[in-house]
Amino acid sequence: MRKIKIGIVGSGGMARHHLERFSPIETAEVVAIASRNEKTGNQLAAKWSATFISDWRHLVEREDIDGIVICTHNNSHGEIAIAALQADKHVFVEYPLANDVVEGETALHLAKAQHHMLRVSHPEVVSNTHAALKQKTTELGELLFSSFVRLTPGRGARPEILFNLPISGIPVHFFVYHIYPVVDLFGEAAWVEGAACYEGLTESGQYDRFVNSVTVAFKHGGIGQWSWAGGIAINTAEQHERYVLTEGTLSDDGKGWKCSTPTEVTDLEIPKTPKSTLQELWLSEIEESAEQELSYADAEVALSSIRISLAAEQSIRENRRVIL
Ligand SMILES: NC(=O)c1ccc[n+]([C@@H]2O[C@H](COP(=O)([O-])OP(=O)(O)OC[C@H]3O[C@@H](n4cnc5c(N)ncnc54)[C@H](OP(=O)(O)O)[C@@H]3O)[C@@H](O)[C@H]2O)c1
Protein backbone atom coordinates (compact mmCIF):
# COMPACT_ATOMS: atom_id res chain seq x y z
CA MET A 1 0.00 0.00 0.00
CA ARG A 2 1.42 3.37 -1.02
CA LYS A 3 1.13 5.88 1.80
CA ILE A 4 0.10 9.48 1.21
CA LYS A 5 3.09 11.60 2.24
CA ILE A 6 2.31 14.72 4.22
CA GLY A 7 4.21 17.85 5.18
CA ILE A 8 2.98 20.06 8.03
CA VAL A 9 3.67 23.79 8.29
CA GLY A 10 3.73 25.19 11.83
CA SER A 11 4.65 23.54 15.11
CA GLY A 12 2.07 24.88 17.56
CA GLY A 13 -1.22 23.63 18.99
CA MET A 14 -2.97 22.77 15.74
CA ALA A 15 0.13 21.12 14.23
CA ARG A 16 0.21 18.84 17.28
CA HIS A 17 -3.53 18.19 16.92
CA HIS A 18 -3.22 17.18 13.25
CA LEU A 19 -0.17 14.99 13.92
CA GLU A 20 -2.15 13.09 16.55
CA ARG A 21 -5.05 12.65 14.14
CA PHE A 22 -2.89 11.54 11.18
CA SER A 23 -0.63 9.18 13.15
CA PRO A 24 -3.11 6.26 13.57
CA ILE A 25 -4.17 6.37 9.89
CA GLU A 26 -2.40 3.61 7.98
CA THR A 27 -2.60 5.34 4.61
CA ALA A 28 -0.81 8.48 5.83
CA GLU A 29 2.76 9.34 6.75
CA VAL A 30 3.90 12.75 8.00
CA VAL A 31 7.40 12.98 6.55
CA ALA A 32 8.38 16.57 7.30
CA ILE A 33 7.48 19.54 9.50
CA ALA A 34 8.36 23.12 8.58
CA SER A 35 8.27 25.94 11.08
CA ARG A 36 9.98 29.24 11.63
CA ASN A 37 10.18 28.19 15.28
CA GLU A 38 13.28 25.99 15.33
CA LYS A 39 12.79 24.86 18.93
CA THR A 40 9.19 23.61 18.72
CA GLY A 41 9.68 22.54 15.09
CA ASN A 42 12.66 20.32 15.94
CA GLN A 43 10.92 18.92 19.03
CA LEU A 44 7.80 18.01 17.09
CA ALA A 45 9.73 16.53 14.16
CA ALA A 46 11.82 14.40 16.56
CA LYS A 47 8.70 13.19 18.38
CA TRP A 48 7.02 12.05 15.15
CA SER A 49 10.20 10.85 13.35
CA ALA A 50 9.82 13.50 10.67
CA THR A 51 12.38 15.80 9.08
CA PHE A 52 12.51 19.39 10.33
CA ILE A 53 12.69 22.14 7.70
CA SER A 54 13.05 25.77 8.78
CA ASP A 55 11.55 27.36 5.65
CA TRP A 56 8.11 26.18 4.50
CA ARG A 57 9.03 27.09 0.89
CA HIS A 58 11.49 24.20 0.86
CA LEU A 59 8.80 21.89 2.22
CA VAL A 60 6.26 22.67 -0.49
CA GLU A 61 8.92 22.15 -3.17
CA ARG A 62 9.72 18.60 -2.03
CA GLU A 63 8.77 16.11 -4.70
CA ASP A 64 8.17 13.20 -2.32
CA ILE A 65 5.26 15.02 -0.61
CA ASP A 66 1.64 14.67 -1.77
CA GLY A 67 -0.14 17.03 0.60
CA ILE A 68 0.56 20.04 2.81
CA VAL A 69 -1.26 20.76 6.08
CA ILE A 70 -1.08 24.45 7.00
CA CYS A 71 -1.15 25.21 10.73
CA THR A 72 0.46 28.64 10.82
CA HIS A 73 -1.22 31.87 11.89
CA ASN A 74 -4.03 33.39 9.84
CA ASN A 75 -1.78 35.92 8.11
CA SER A 76 0.12 33.24 6.15
CA HIS A 77 -2.58 30.66 5.26
CA GLY A 78 -3.38 32.07 1.82
CA GLU A 79 0.23 32.54 0.73
CA ILE A 80 1.27 29.04 1.78
CA ALA A 81 -1.85 27.42 0.27
CA ILE A 82 -1.20 29.11 -3.08
CA ALA A 83 2.50 28.14 -3.07
CA ALA A 84 1.66 24.53 -2.18
CA LEU A 85 -0.97 24.25 -4.92
CA GLN A 86 1.44 25.82 -7.41
CA ALA A 87 3.97 23.16 -6.36
CA ASP A 88 1.42 20.47 -7.28
CA LYS A 89 0.35 19.55 -3.73
CA HIS A 90 -3.02 18.84 -2.15
CA VAL A 91 -3.80 21.29 0.67
CA PHE A 92 -5.52 21.04 4.05
CA VAL A 93 -5.49 24.48 5.66
CA GLU A 94 -6.57 25.60 9.09
CA TYR A 95 -9.32 28.22 8.99
CA PRO A 96 -9.54 30.93 7.80
CA LEU A 97 -8.77 29.98 4.20
CA ALA A 98 -6.92 33.29 3.71
CA ASN A 99 -6.66 36.84 5.02
CA ASP A 100 -7.49 38.24 1.63
CA VAL A 101 -10.36 37.34 -0.70
CA VAL A 102 -8.20 37.37 -3.84
CA GLU A 103 -5.78 34.93 -2.19
CA GLY A 104 -8.68 32.65 -1.27
CA GLU A 105 -10.10 32.84 -4.81
CA THR A 106 -6.66 32.14 -6.28
CA ALA A 107 -6.19 29.08 -4.09
CA LEU A 108 -9.60 27.69 -5.06
CA HIS A 109 -9.03 28.42 -8.74
CA LEU A 110 -5.61 26.68 -8.64
CA ALA A 111 -7.03 23.65 -6.84
CA LYS A 112 -9.78 23.24 -9.44
CA ALA A 113 -7.48 23.88 -12.40
CA GLN A 114 -4.89 21.38 -11.16
CA HIS A 115 -7.40 18.86 -9.84
CA HIS A 116 -5.95 19.02 -6.33
CA MET A 117 -7.88 18.86 -3.11
CA LEU A 118 -8.28 22.06 -1.11
CA ARG A 119 -9.90 21.41 2.24
CA VAL A 120 -10.31 23.98 5.00
CA SER A 121 -10.46 22.74 8.58
CA HIS A 122 -14.18 23.38 9.16
CA PRO A 123 -15.62 20.38 11.02
CA GLU A 124 -19.29 20.86 10.07
CA VAL A 125 -18.82 18.53 7.09
CA VAL A 126 -18.25 15.65 9.52
CA SER A 127 -20.73 16.77 12.19
CA ASN A 128 -23.99 14.90 12.86
CA THR A 129 -25.42 17.98 14.57
CA HIS A 130 -24.76 20.12 11.53
CA ALA A 131 -26.25 17.44 9.25
CA ALA A 132 -29.41 17.40 11.41
CA LEU A 133 -29.63 21.21 11.30
CA LYS A 134 -29.19 21.16 7.54
CA GLN A 135 -32.05 18.67 7.15
CA LYS A 136 -34.34 20.50 9.62
CA THR A 137 -33.82 23.93 8.09
CA THR A 138 -34.99 22.55 4.73
CA GLU A 139 -38.25 21.43 6.44
CA LEU A 140 -38.98 24.73 8.20
CA GLY A 141 -39.51 27.04 5.22
CA GLU A 142 -37.57 30.19 4.48
CA LEU A 143 -34.98 31.85 6.69
CA LEU A 144 -36.11 35.06 8.34
CA PHE A 145 -33.30 35.62 10.80
CA SER A 146 -30.19 33.88 12.13
CA SER A 147 -28.43 35.07 15.24
CA PHE A 148 -25.27 34.06 17.06
CA VAL A 149 -23.96 35.56 20.32
CA ARG A 150 -20.79 34.52 22.12
CA LEU A 151 -19.51 36.06 25.34
CA THR A 152 -16.14 35.02 26.72
CA PRO A 153 -14.43 36.12 29.93
CA GLY A 154 -10.75 35.74 29.10
CA ARG A 155 -8.27 36.09 26.32
CA GLY A 156 -8.18 32.35 25.61
CA ALA A 157 -5.30 29.92 25.62
CA ARG A 158 -3.43 31.76 22.87
CA PRO A 159 -3.86 35.46 23.75
CA GLU A 160 -0.90 36.43 21.60
CA ILE A 161 -2.74 35.35 18.44
CA LEU A 162 -6.38 35.66 19.53
CA PHE A 163 -6.55 39.33 20.46
CA ASN A 164 -4.20 40.48 17.77
CA LEU A 165 -5.35 42.37 14.66
CA PRO A 166 -2.25 41.97 12.41
CA ILE A 167 -1.84 38.24 13.07
CA SER A 168 -5.44 37.03 13.24
CA GLY A 169 -7.57 39.83 11.81
CA ILE A 170 -10.61 41.28 13.53
CA PRO A 171 -12.55 38.93 15.84
CA VAL A 172 -15.12 37.96 13.19
CA HIS A 173 -12.28 36.77 10.96
CA PHE A 174 -10.59 34.83 13.74
CA PHE A 175 -14.00 33.36 14.66
CA VAL A 176 -14.93 32.65 11.02
CA TYR A 177 -15.74 29.09 12.12
CA HIS A 178 -19.01 30.53 13.50
CA ILE A 179 -19.78 32.08 10.10
CA TYR A 180 -19.07 28.91 8.09
CA PRO A 181 -21.99 26.78 9.41
CA VAL A 182 -24.52 29.55 8.78
CA VAL A 183 -23.25 30.15 5.24
CA ASP A 184 -23.37 26.39 4.66
CA LEU A 185 -27.05 26.42 5.72
CA PHE A 186 -28.28 29.65 4.14
CA GLY A 187 -25.82 30.58 1.40
CA GLU A 188 -23.89 33.68 0.48
CA ALA A 189 -24.40 37.22 1.75
CA ALA A 190 -25.57 40.09 -0.47
CA TRP A 191 -24.24 42.81 1.83
CA VAL A 192 -22.31 43.12 5.10
CA GLU A 193 -22.18 45.69 7.90
CA GLY A 194 -19.72 45.41 10.77
CA ALA A 195 -18.96 47.22 14.02
CA ALA A 196 -16.15 46.75 16.51
CA CYS A 197 -14.84 48.38 19.71
CA TYR A 198 -11.55 47.53 21.36
CA GLU A 199 -10.29 48.38 24.85
CA GLY A 200 -6.59 48.59 25.57
CA LEU A 201 -5.71 48.61 21.86
CA THR A 202 -1.96 49.04 21.43
CA GLU A 203 -0.06 50.40 18.43
CA SER A 204 0.93 46.85 17.51
CA GLY A 205 -2.76 45.87 17.28
CA GLN A 206 -3.22 43.86 20.49
CA TYR A 207 -6.11 44.56 22.85
CA ASP A 208 -7.63 43.38 26.14
CA ARG A 209 -11.38 43.52 25.53
CA PHE A 210 -13.56 43.70 22.44
CA VAL A 211 -17.09 43.77 21.09
CA ASN A 212 -17.57 42.88 17.42
CA SER A 213 -20.87 42.51 15.58
CA VAL A 214 -21.72 41.71 11.98
CA THR A 215 -25.02 41.90 10.11
CA VAL A 216 -25.63 40.45 6.65
CA ALA A 217 -28.53 40.05 4.24
CA PHE A 218 -28.43 36.62 2.60
CA LYS A 219 -28.79 36.48 -1.18
CA HIS A 220 -31.66 33.96 -0.77
CA GLY A 221 -33.41 36.11 1.84
CA GLY A 222 -33.21 36.61 5.56
CA ILE A 223 -30.92 38.58 7.85
CA GLY A 224 -27.94 37.12 9.71
CA GLN A 225 -26.26 38.54 12.79
CA TRP A 226 -23.21 37.53 14.80
CA SER A 227 -21.93 39.22 17.98
CA TRP A 228 -18.87 38.45 20.00
CA ALA A 229 -17.67 40.07 23.22
CA GLY A 230 -14.38 38.92 24.71
CA GLY A 231 -12.32 39.73 27.77
CA ILE A 232 -15.56 40.89 29.43
CA ALA A 233 -16.85 40.74 33.00
CA ILE A 234 -18.61 37.39 32.90
CA ASN A 235 -18.00 34.24 34.93
CA THR A 236 -18.04 31.59 32.18
CA ALA A 237 -18.37 31.65 28.39
CA GLU A 238 -21.90 31.76 26.96
CA GLN A 239 -23.16 31.04 23.47
CA HIS A 240 -26.66 31.49 22.02
CA GLU A 241 -27.75 30.57 18.50
CA ARG A 242 -31.09 30.97 16.70
CA TYR A 243 -32.34 30.13 13.21
CA VAL A 244 -35.78 31.72 12.78
CA LEU A 245 -37.61 30.30 9.74
CA THR A 246 -41.14 30.84 8.45
CA GLU A 247 -42.43 27.52 9.93
CA GLY A 248 -40.38 27.22 13.13
CA THR A 249 -37.34 28.29 15.13
CA LEU A 250 -34.21 26.31 15.96
CA SER A 251 -32.31 27.47 19.02
CA ASP A 252 -29.41 26.42 21.22
CA ASP A 253 -28.42 28.11 24.47
CA GLY A 254 -25.62 25.67 25.18
CA LYS A 255 -27.92 22.81 26.26
CA GLY A 256 -28.64 21.30 22.85
CA TRP A 257 -30.70 22.35 19.84
CA LYS A 258 -34.48 22.71 20.20
CA CYS A 259 -37.09 23.16 17.52
CA SER A 260 -39.99 25.43 18.40
CA THR A 261 -43.16 25.59 16.24
CA PRO A 262 -46.56 27.16 17.04
CA THR A 263 -47.72 23.76 18.42
CA GLU A 264 -44.72 22.24 20.24
CA VAL A 265 -41.10 22.42 21.36
CA THR A 266 -38.98 19.35 20.62
CA ASP A 267 -35.33 18.41 20.92
CA LEU A 268 -33.57 18.31 17.56
CA GLU A 269 -32.91 14.66 16.77
CA ILE A 270 -29.23 14.14 16.10
CA PRO A 271 -28.32 10.87 14.31
CA LYS A 272 -25.35 8.95 15.71
CA THR A 273 -23.92 8.06 12.31
CA PRO A 274 -20.20 7.26 12.55
CA LYS A 275 -18.28 9.96 10.70
CA SER A 276 -14.79 10.18 9.30
CA THR A 277 -12.41 12.70 10.78
CA LEU A 278 -11.52 15.69 8.61
CA GLN A 279 -8.06 14.16 8.16
CA GLU A 280 -9.53 10.84 6.94
CA LEU A 281 -11.86 12.72 4.62
CA TRP A 282 -8.99 14.71 3.09
CA LEU A 283 -6.89 11.56 2.59
CA SER A 284 -9.75 9.72 0.90
CA GLU A 285 -10.34 12.75 -1.34
CA ILE A 286 -6.65 12.66 -2.35
CA GLU A 287 -6.95 8.95 -3.15
CA GLU A 288 -10.12 9.54 -5.18
CA SER A 289 -8.58 12.47 -7.06
CA ALA A 290 -6.76 10.02 -9.35
CA GLU A 291 -10.06 8.67 -10.66
CA GLN A 292 -12.91 11.08 -10.13
CA GLU A 293 -14.06 14.68 -9.97
CA LEU A 294 -13.42 16.38 -6.65
CA SER A 295 -15.96 18.38 -4.69
CA TYR A 296 -14.93 21.87 -3.70
CA ALA A 297 -18.16 22.57 -1.80
CA ASP A 298 -16.31 22.99 1.50
CA ALA A 299 -13.74 25.36 0.03
CA GLU A 300 -16.52 27.38 -1.66
CA VAL A 301 -18.30 27.84 1.69
CA ALA A 302 -14.99 28.67 3.39
CA LEU A 303 -14.39 31.32 0.72
CA SER A 304 -17.90 32.78 1.11
CA SER A 305 -17.29 32.88 4.87
CA ILE A 306 -14.09 34.92 4.60
CA ARG A 307 -15.88 37.19 2.12
CA ILE A 308 -18.19 38.07 5.04
CA SER A 309 -15.48 38.43 7.69
CA LEU A 310 -13.22 40.50 5.44
CA ALA A 311 -16.14 42.63 4.23
CA ALA A 312 -17.00 43.28 7.90
CA GLU A 313 -13.46 44.54 8.39
CA GLN A 314 -13.84 46.79 5.34
CA SER A 315 -17.24 47.98 6.56
CA ILE A 316 -15.70 49.03 9.90
CA ARG A 317 -12.71 50.69 8.24
CA GLU A 318 -14.82 52.64 5.73
CA ASN A 319 -17.87 53.12 7.97
CA ARG A 320 -20.32 51.87 5.36
CA ARG A 321 -22.34 48.88 4.18
CA VAL A 322 -20.27 46.64 1.85
CA ILE A 323 -22.15 45.16 -1.10
CA LEU A 324 -20.79 41.76 -2.19
N1 LIG B 1 -9.52 23.97 13.77
C1 LIG B 1 -9.50 24.36 15.03
O1 LIG B 1 -10.22 23.86 15.89
C2 LIG B 1 -8.57 25.49 15.44
C3 LIG B 1 -8.39 25.76 16.80
C4 LIG B 1 -7.49 26.74 17.13
C5 LIG B 1 -6.82 27.44 16.14
N2 LIG B 1 -7.05 27.18 14.82
C6 LIG B 1 -6.32 27.88 13.75
O2 LIG B 1 -5.09 27.18 13.52
C7 LIG B 1 -4.03 28.08 13.23
C8 LIG B 1 -2.86 27.79 14.15
O3 LIG B 1 -3.26 27.98 15.48
P1 LIG B 1 -2.38 27.42 16.69
O4 LIG B 1 -3.26 27.48 17.87
O5 LIG B 1 -1.76 26.11 16.32
O6 LIG B 1 -1.24 28.55 16.76
P2 LIG B 1 0.18 28.42 17.47
O7 LIG B 1 0.11 27.44 18.58
O8 LIG B 1 0.67 29.78 17.74
O9 LIG B 1 1.10 27.74 16.32
C9 LIG B 1 1.35 28.35 15.08
C10 LIG B 1 2.66 27.79 14.55
O10 LIG B 1 2.90 28.28 13.23
C11 LIG B 1 4.18 28.95 13.23
N3 LIG B 1 4.05 30.04 12.26
C12 LIG B 1 3.22 31.10 12.34
N4 LIG B 1 3.34 31.88 11.25
C13 LIG B 1 4.29 31.29 10.46
C14 LIG B 1 4.87 31.62 9.21
N5 LIG B 1 4.46 32.71 8.54
N6 LIG B 1 5.81 30.80 8.69
C15 LIG B 1 6.21 29.70 9.38
N7 LIG B 1 5.71 29.32 10.58
C16 LIG B 1 4.75 30.12 11.11
C17 LIG B 1 4.37 29.42 14.65
O11 LIG B 1 5.70 29.75 14.91
P3 LIG B 1 6.06 30.67 16.23
O12 LIG B 1 6.09 29.72 17.38
O13 LIG B 1 7.40 31.25 15.89
O14 LIG B 1 4.98 31.72 16.36
C18 LIG B 1 3.87 28.19 15.38
O15 LIG B 1 4.81 27.14 15.31
C19 LIG B 1 -4.61 29.49 13.38
O16 LIG B 1 -4.88 30.01 12.11
C20 LIG B 1 -5.90 29.29 14.15
O17 LIG B 1 -6.90 30.19 13.75
C21 LIG B 1 -7.89 26.20 14.48
Image: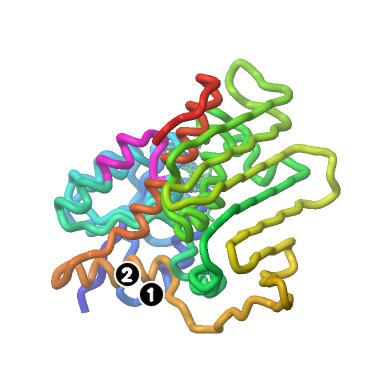
Closer-to-camera residue (88/193): 193
- In the depicted structure, whether residue 265 falls above or below residue 323: below
What residue type is disc 2 on? Ala
Q: Is residue 91 left or right of residue 181?
A: left
Determine contact: label 2, label 1, CB under 8 Å.
yes
**In the image, which residues are magenta?**
97-107
| Quarter holding residue 175 | top right
Q: Residue at the location (67% across, 72% down)? A: 259
Q: Residue at x 60, y 53 (%)?
A: 146
Write down the residue under mark 1: 25
Label 1 sits on what residue type? Ile
Residue 130, magenta (yes or no)? no
Instruction: Indicate the secondary structure of the residue bearing disc 1.
Output: loop
User: Can residue 99 be found in the magenta stretch?
Assistant: yes
Principal SS element in the magenta part? helix
Q: Quadrant of the N terminus?
A: bottom left
Q: Which residue is mark 2?
A: 28
